[in-house]
Amino acid sequence: MSDLLANDVITPDAGETPLLSLPDVSILKAAPMTRLSLRLRKAAIPAAGEAFGANLPVTPLGAEISAKRAALWMGPDEWTLLAPEDELQAVFDGIEAKLDGQPHSLTDISHRSEALIVSGPKASWLLNTGIFVDFSLEKFPVGTVTRTIFHKSPVMIWRTGEDTFVVEAWVSFMDYVAGILVESAQELAAA
Amino acid sequence: MSQPFRTEKGGRIDRGQQLTFTFDGEEMQGHKGDTLASALLANGVHLVGRSFKYHRPRGIVTAGSEEPNALVGVYRKGDQTPNLRATQVEVYQGLEAISQNRFPSLGFDVGAVNDLLSPLFPAGFYYKTFMWPKAFWDRVYEPVIRAAAGLGKPPKNPDHDTYGNIYAHCDVLVAGSGPAGLAAAVAAAETGAKVILCDEQAEFGGSLLSDENATIDGKPPAEWVRDTIVKLQGMDNVTLLSRTTAFGYFAHNYIALAERVTEHVSDPDPKLPRERLWQVRAKEVVIASGAIERPMVFPENDRPGILLADAGRTYLNRYGVKVGNKVLIATACDTAWQAAFDLADHGVDVVAIADLRETPPENLVAIAQARGIRVEAGCVVTGTLGRKRVKAALLGRLMTSGQVASAGQVACDAILMSGGWTPTVSLYSQSRGKVVWDETVGAYVPGKSVQHERSAGAAKGLYGLQATLEDGYAAGEAAAKAAIGKEAKVTYAAASGGEAGQGAVLGALPHDRNASRVKAFVDYQNDVTAKDIKLAAREGMQSIEHIKRYTTTGMATDQGRLSNMNALSIASGALEKPIVDVGLTTFRLPYTPTTFGLFAGVARGDHFDPVRKTPSHDWVVANGGVYEDVGQWKRTWYFPKSGEDMHAAVARECATVRESVGLFDASTLGKIEVVGPDAAEFLERMYTNPWKKLAPGRCRYGLMLNDAGFIVDDGVIGRLADDRFHVTTTTGGAPSVFATMEDYLQTEWPDLDVWITSTTEQYAVAAVQGPKAREVIAPFIEGIDLSADPFPHMSVKEGTFCGVPCRLFRISFTGELGFEINVPRRHGKMTWETLAGEIEKHNGTAYGTETMHVLRAEKGYIIVGQDTDGTVTPQDAGMSWAIGKKKHDFVGKRGLERPDLVAENRKQFVGLLTKDPKVKLEEGAQITVAQNPATGTPAEGHVTSSYYSPAMGRTIALAIVKNGHALHGKSLYVPMPDGSIEVEVTSPIFFDKEGARLNV
């Protein structure tokens, strides 16, 4: 997990056994965290970043990280904000207070999705069994985040290290996503 | 018998590794490196199948994936895969293969009677069966054709293999690893471009593996291949894929490859997939698919033992197998002469070279004479003898008059033929490219590139080893330059030998036989003869597209790669049109037959589609709930207690909710959080109802229309704050409602300061419904006064449930006092189990979707999609009250003013009560005015919902009926197979019409 950025936000769920543990790739469930969907107009971007504690990235597919905060670019006017689970109310109230009077939408989506941490030299190969994105480092450098499709499920992919990816899916899709990832990795264990 | 046709030495097989396999149960030996075809030939087996239509004995014709005859079944793990080409099946220890399309055996096949009856099966006979006599179709033609059609037997068991999938991106994809492909891969790889090189065969090298005479950089071709592959293997930017067929070329340089991962292994690790689908996005593609040799169309050219000349050479040089002991070469092209020389050098008796040309090249004639091979120039094969194996050929001399004079008979046990070469343009054609006729090549070659691709070498009609290599290098350089803008200096390898062959022939060859009695095959696999194509032309088919469908020529698994050019030439002669005016059919994917498993991949069983579960799932399973699938969701249908059937369980659940309390999982309902200063304005535009005056803390039922004015969704919407609404949608409508809203926001009203966020999965929802609902939830709720005055029907407040934050709605889809508790999803399980325990104390019950349906039907609440069908307006549904009359506009407002939507006689939503209260109507049943309407009478409407209602002590139904609102109290009929059912039209609200039970 050494190359995992923002490892104070995305942490393996302590109580869970790994879903997959092979020499070349492992899958861990991430612990619950605060997730907020923030929508606003351009003018409010600096203030929102200040209130949150991490700048809102304006480069498409970008992410900005600071201590216990990550802001992920989801669209020209949309960000997913990550913070530790127990800071939900404080973060929410802080942004609302700062943006009072500026049109915006801040919505709690902490429970909407779950995250997996897929890491190892074969991590990008494993994701490519179901995702058509080019995960070469030139095209998808560390820090890149995108929403895409894994087989038939919408997912969000965030590369937090050369060999480490956060894979998020809506909770009811996670059995499907995790199940296929584990199934597709089986050939790596072949003799 | 131990491989009598194996050469003493040579070939690329591993003579040290002997493998045992069976064909039709007979045990034989082969070597590692053999294909099933080469191993069978080594054992002297040519007869490998029966033809499709006439059941003629057939043998191996080619050494590649275009093989038309040698289709076999292979047993593996207790089941059979049919229609594999023996030329592609690699021999492994214990391989079990069978022949196809024969009964009772390959040697004696009763279907062969079709060959004698062939006058009854002319070209287009299938279409002719449509014409006369009509009565024959059902009882004769269809059963017979169905029984006779198809090759091989489908496997019986579920597929025991797994199939992988991988998406890949590259700068340059090279399809084919012959001289052009290898050169292209090397040139592209040297620039640093990401290269994928794939080849359908087990080994890279293509034609180079069959050539023992030429040299490249002074080395034998196979050695140069080995060195080149070693070099490519050492480069990080190169992916080498053998046993991998580029079978589909789609838009935007998206190429599909089929990699056969374990098919060639005797006992593969079950963790490995059988095959892997590569979905590649390539910036540039080099098509180096080579060329294949053309059969010659002479009478009885389909006997076992008659092969393409180059195939004979490949079996000899690559596999160390002699196709026969006495071989006749029949050719119109120089390249077949080399096959003759190679065979002679391996001690095979080449009985003659019959060259169609009057004057074959002198140098070749000289070499032949030096080896003592008889040369017949201006000579054609006019027929062959031998049933299960060719035993002699009839020769004919071409006269200047165009006639053919008999030139005697020559005994032989194999004939190698060559009508010249046809470039393989399949992938180019799949890329939407249009081939052009090249007179000098005598073939169709790739024309302009439509996508980012280029053909190289023989695939574009360029022959000769040196020229092919150079073209390959150039293509690789050009592709890399186009892909990444870089160039590299590559030293081109220099070849000697492997010169391009001259000479070719197209179409049916002349002969001195009775034309009406002989069969000269054009398409072996589909049993199409030269005669069939001429007949099709005589019967009016003008275009090759029509001739193809009428005769089925070119419709076999090789898509006409072997047969097209001969068919075109024959059609051209019959139609008296130049060949280019006859047209050419389009090659389509897949390039070679591809398994269904490859396309299905992981999409099977539980992973066919996401199975979405709610937080109550484990509890429901533990408590015996029965699920129904609602889209991707698992929803509980009903909760039977021991001994209860569905009817009893639902009746009990319904009664319990009305008497005390019920618990229902409503988590699947769509939820959208609409936030921003313009939130109310936005909803005002999206829904028919008014929203601006709805106070925070209150809810309203919302109705959504499409532009046409028809109901598309509904749900309760709660206002949490001035700028924040909690919208609910139907379970099935959630994604489309969200998409519609986002569409309007982005394209119509980008000026509105409002944003939507899906919160469907943020909240788990437990609905507690019934007179005791308040008592059930009260112990767990904090921060909300539940009494009716501060918290009336249609309210929403935020508080806590067992200490976790909740949004509590007081709403009802049952007509009873009801609450819906929304908690963050991770607390859903706790919430459900807490409530399930609590309702026990009140003699309550958990209930499922069926009870929910009955309870809402008793109240006349519609279910969008069940009681509406996309043609129902709010007025039709009796819901004009949901339309904000003073509103300036909303989606569907103008649609509602269309003349046909305000016309009389629209179908309207009503209740139906059967005269006999025990009779339950069928949902979907038609409704008529007359008791026994004449056939063809249009229906007045149909039953949309029908249930037994415990509260009413009888059956009830909902329906849409023409002018239904004016028909209350009138009788109509529901005609059914066992008699017409009389019904009375009523209000759709059956129970508690005043709504007194809601407001307690």
Image (cartoon, rainbow, N blue to C red):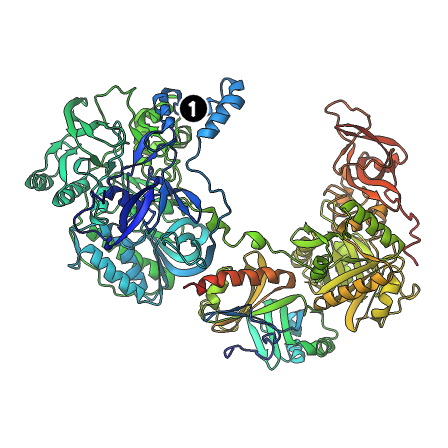
Please say if B18 is above or below A92. Answer: above
Query: Can residue B960 be seen in this snapshot?
Result: yes
Give the quadrant of residue B303: top left
Q: Quadrant of the N terminus of chain B?
A: top left
Q: Nearer the viewer, residue B665 or A127?
A: B665
Residue B814 shown left or right of residue B144 in the figure: right
Q: Quadrant of the C terminus of chain B?
A: bottom right
Query: From this viewpoint, which residue is outermost toward the bottom?
Result: A67
Where residue B374 sits in the image (x, y, percent)? 10, 34
Query: Can residue A56 be seen in this snapshot?
Result: no
Q: Label 1 belongs to which residue? A: B125
Residue B929 shown left or right of residue A166 in the figure: right
Where residue B100 sits in the image (x, y, percent)? 38, 36
Please say if B294 is above or below B131. Answer: below
Amino acid type assigned to the residue bearing label 1 in the image: Phe
Residue A104 shown left or right of residue B58 in the figure: right
Task: Assess disc 1: are there few (<14), some (14-19) or many (≥20) residues with their C-alpha within 10 Å of its C-alpha.
Answer: few
Q: Nearer the viewer, residue B176 or B631?
A: B631
SS for tag 1? helix
Query: From this viewpoint, which residue is outermost toward the top?
Result: B133
Residue A174 shown left or right of residue B122 in the figure: right
Please say if A106 is above or below B261. Answer: below
Where residue B837 sits in the image (x, y, percent)? 80, 64
Q: Nearer the viewer, residue B863 or A182?
A: A182
Give the quadrant of residue B525: top left
